[in-house]
Image (cartoon, rainbow, N blue to C red):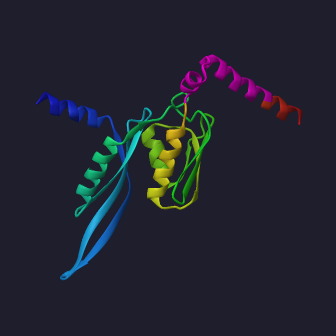
Amino acid sequence: MARNENRDERDSEFVDRLVHINRVAKVVKGGRRFGFAALVVIGDQRGRVGFGHGKAREVPEAIRKATESAKRHMIRVPLREGRTLHHDIAGRHGAGKVELRAAPPGTGIIAGGPMRAVFEVLGMQDVVAKSVGSSNPYNMIHATFAALKKQGSPRSVAARRGKKVSDLITRRRDEAHDASEVEATS
């Protein structure tokens, strides 16, 4: 009994969003049989997010299957200060291309449709995103996840390059300071 209660507690920490529902028809001898396909994103609003696809004859069953699939395919995304991206990234899947940019505090989520749902359940507060190409929700979600998988934290970059995190962070601040001086003189 304790195991089921523990699972319910773990499930309650996730926030899920229904992104898209598609009704499909199969033509049979007696007419049409309708089925439903659901696309769901799920996240803990602290840097973990996943998406899933489910198909069934009933809408609630399709959503349940999609949610289960999303829980099995979650990824962790490093966030700067728990609110935005560390660097600008682009992702693509099929004809869907997305560009994600880090944003200063107070910007909010500037993104359309399916991408907005991903950022909300991820817990991201400031981001600017642009979808170029396909507006198909499946392609947009796949492209967004492809971009988020490329996101690196200063800690992982420092470990890969054999440097200290403080060296990378101070360089970022120096470049921002130099850029502001150039703008002031122009």
Whether 172 is drawn above or below 60: the answer is above
Q: Residue furthest left?
A: 1
Residue 159, percent from left and from top? 55, 22
**Residue at 14% over, 28% down:** 2
Magenta-drawn stretch contains 102: no
**Residue at 41% over, 40% down:** 49
Q: Give the left or right position of residue 3, taking residue 18 as reference.
A: left
Q: Nearer the viewer, residue 107 or 167?
A: 167
Whether 65 is drawn above or below 47: the answer is below
Q: Quadrant of residue 7?
A: top left
Residue 78, percent from left and from top? 50, 31
Q: Nearer the viewer, residue 135 or 119?
A: 135
Q: Quadrant of residue 131?
A: bottom right
**Residue at 59% over, 33% down:** 86
Q: Which residues are magenta?
A: 153-178
Q: Quick one: quadrant of the C terminus?
A: top right
Residue 4, percent from left and from top? 16, 34
Q: Give the left or right position of residue 119, taking residue 5 as reference.
A: right
Q: Give the left or right position of residue 12, taking residue 183 as reference.
A: left
**Residue at 51% over, 41% down:** 148
Magenta part, dominant SS: helix
Magenta-drawn stretch contains 154: yes
- All told, the count of numbered labels is 0
Q: Give the left or right position of residue 146, taking residue 71 as reference.
A: right
Residue 76, percent from left and from top? 43, 34
Q: Quick one: quadrant of the N terminus?
A: top left
Q: Quadrant of residue 21?
A: bottom left
